[in-house]
Amino acid sequence: MTNKSVAVIGAGTMGSAVAVALKNNGFSVVATRRTVEKLDDLKTMGMEVSSDNQDAILKSDAVIFSLKPAETVIQMRKLDKELEGKLVISICASLPLSKMESLLPNSTVIRAMTNVASRVGGGFTAYCISDKVDKAGEKAALDVLRCFGEVEKIEERYMDALTPISGSGPAYIFTVIEAMVYAGLKVGLPRELALRASYQTILGSAKLVAESGDSLSALKETVITPGGVTIEALYELEDSRITTAFMKAIEAAADKARKSSYEFLNNLEDKEGN
C-alpha cells in the first residue's frame, strides 16, 4: 500500500483495537465514531478522529468497517462512490462477501474476523476473499491484517463456526486467568504474583503448543506425575466436567452466530424486497 493510510469506520472496542495495531505498525489512521469524544485515547496516540465517515474514507487508501452488519450495509450503500478503487475490509459478523461485492462492485472487498488481542499484535485473524480479488489486492489486505497478529486464509463457510473460538475466545481465556488468580489468592499468594504467574503460564503454554509440534495430550502428560499435584488438580477439573462445559459453551455460541447470520440475511432480503 503506497501511503499506508487506513480509515477505521466504527471505532468501538474492536475498531479501536485494530486502529491501535495499525498505528503501532506505522499506518496513518483516521478513526470514526458517532460520539467522537469517546476516541480521545486514540487522538492522544496521534490518530485523527472524526464523526465524518465520508471524509475519513476520502483521506484513506484502505477502509475497515467495524460496525454492526446492518449499519455496515447502510454505510457501504451510502458511500459506494467514495469507496471506489479502495481496499475495503469488513470485520463485522454475518455480512457475506457476496453482499459486500454487490454493494461495492468497484472496490477490493475482504471479509475478516479478528479479536481484541489484535490491539497488542496478538490476535488471530481469519479472512476470506472471492475470485474477484487479485494477488495485488490480497497482498494489500495482508499488509493490513498482519498488523493484528497471526493471519490465516479460510473458506467463508467456516466464518460463523470460527467466531466463538477466535472471536470470542479471549473472553474465555480471561475467565480462566481470573479463576487462576482467585485460586492463587485462596492459597495465600499476593494478587500481583498470582496474576503474573497465571497469565505468563498461559502465554508459555500457548507458545509450547505452537512451537513443539506435540499433541495436546502428549504435552499434558509431560506435566503429570503419579500421585502428584497436577493429577490431583486435573481430577477436580474433570469432576466438574470442565471439558464438556467448554465444548457446550462454544457449540452454543456457534449456534448463536449461525442464527444471527441467518436472521440478518433474511431481514435484509425482506427489506430489499419491499
Image (cartoon, grey):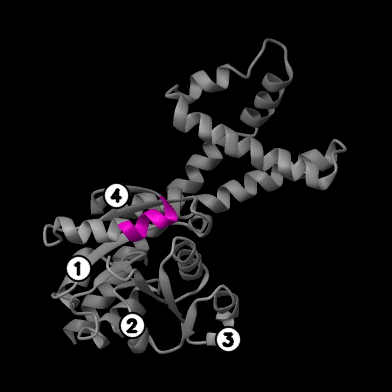
Q: Are marks 2 and 4 in contact (CB under 8 Å)?
A: no
The amino acid marked with disc number 1 is Thr
Q: Does the magenta run of residues contain 53?
A: no
Closer to us: 102 or 193:
193
Name the disc covering residue 158, or none: 4
User: Quick one: label 3, few (<14), some, or many (20+) residues within 10 Å?
Assistant: few
Q: Earlier in the sequence, mark 1 or mark 4?
A: 1
* Left or right of 41 in this view: 70: left
Q: Compute the Cα span from label 2 to label 1.
A: 17 Å
Q: Nearer the viewer, mark 2 or mark 4?
A: 2
For disc 1, the marked residue is 108
Q: Nearer the viewer, mark 1 or mark 4?
A: 1
The amino acid marked with disc number 2 is Lys
Q: Is residue 159 above or below residue 228?
A: below
Q: Earlier in the sequence, mark 2 or mark 3?
A: 3
Name the disc covering residue 59, or none: 2
* Left or right of 243 in this view: 185: right
**Quarter of the picture holding the N terminus:** bottom left
Q: Compute the Cα span from label 3 to label 1.
A: 31 Å
Q: Compute the Cα span from label 4 to label 3.
A: 37 Å
Q: Which range is magenta?
A: 143-149
The amino acid marked with disc number 3 is Glu
